[in-house]
Amino acid sequence: MKFVHLKKKWLWHLIGPVVVIVAFSWAGPAKVWEVLSKAEPKFLAAAIVLTIPIALIKGIRWRILLGNYDIKLGFADSTSMYATGMVFSAVTPGRVGDLVKIAILIKRGFSVAKAIACSILDRLYDVGAVLLAGYGGMWYFSGQFASQLRIINICGVAVMAAAAVFVARQHLIKKLAIKLIPSQYHLAARKSWNEITEGFWKDKLGRNFLVVTWTILFWLIQFSAIYLCGLAVGLNAPFIYTCACAAVATVLSLLPITVAGVGTRDAVFILLLGQIGISRQQSLAFSALVLTVFLLNCVIFYLISVIFKPKRNLS
């Protein structure tokens, strides 16, 4: 029974590759290759070079987040740790491999609560930035995204209402959450909750502002690199529209049905770029270049994780 359950679980991970095969068969592999063969190398090279600093930027942001929880790491340590997480993220469904940073922190002797809090906040900042970018792009081109915006607006109001309740009623939510776990873990749960919330709220506004700043810089670089991939295959799409499409694809890449966004990204590009007259062949060629840049950067991230070898922490 356990083997059958595991087999069914892995079947979900095949959805992405199946979508790719169907999409390429539908568009015609020869036609997609024809578009790719005419790609401008200078734009592709520029996209690769532009994304090289990403691991360093994420390393800086990771170090700030760790500092919020009194975890002291040097620049080399934080960059290497984050680069390791990015490599694992690239080869796991839903990018869950990024959570390897939690295991590294725990192995170094830091508390489980702090390790989990840092990793969750790190993911939330990125998801928040992508959602805002996607929404902004859709709102700017509301004519093409009218039906999607109605659904997103409803979801957005619900999320903001939930966030407002969480902020206003933290103590009540804390009590309810603790009651849901066995009594012998109540003391540890209260301690973990306090560690998580204090690390974010207590005298950390300046540091959180820095985290937001580095997050914006990262996504500007990321979206610019993706736009350059579009220029390489002659994609005639505005920068903001391209960012909106990339943002939607990025959010869907977090689903455990794909690895490195394979399948979900292709489907999003075909559907959304098709609304402004971009052919299936161009959309798939564009997606293939984005994946190529992503994989090349994974190699760079791996080299960075090796070069910046973790040093003994200073805590």
Image (spheres, rainbow, N blue to C red):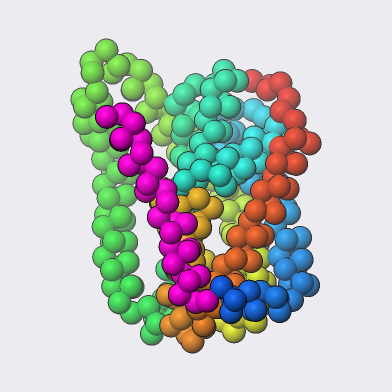
Tell me if residue 150 comes above or below residue 72 in the rendering. Answer: below
- Quarter holding the C terminus is top right
Image location of residue 263, percent across then percent down: 47, 61
**Main secondary structure type of the part rendered in magenta:** helix
The residue at the point 73 percent across, 72 percent down is 43
The residue at the point 51 percent across, 36 percent down is 99
Q: Left or right? Give the position of 280 relative to 169.
A: right
Is 4 contained in the magenta span? Answer: yes
Image location of residue 201, percent across then percent down: 45, 38
Image location of residue 84, percent across then percent down: 64, 37
Q: Is residue 179 visible?
A: yes
Q: Is residue 134 visible?
A: no
Q: Residue furthest bottom?
A: 277
Which stretch did the figure color magenta?
1-28
The residue at the point 31 percent across, 56 percent down is 160
Image location of residue 241, percent across then percent down: 51, 76
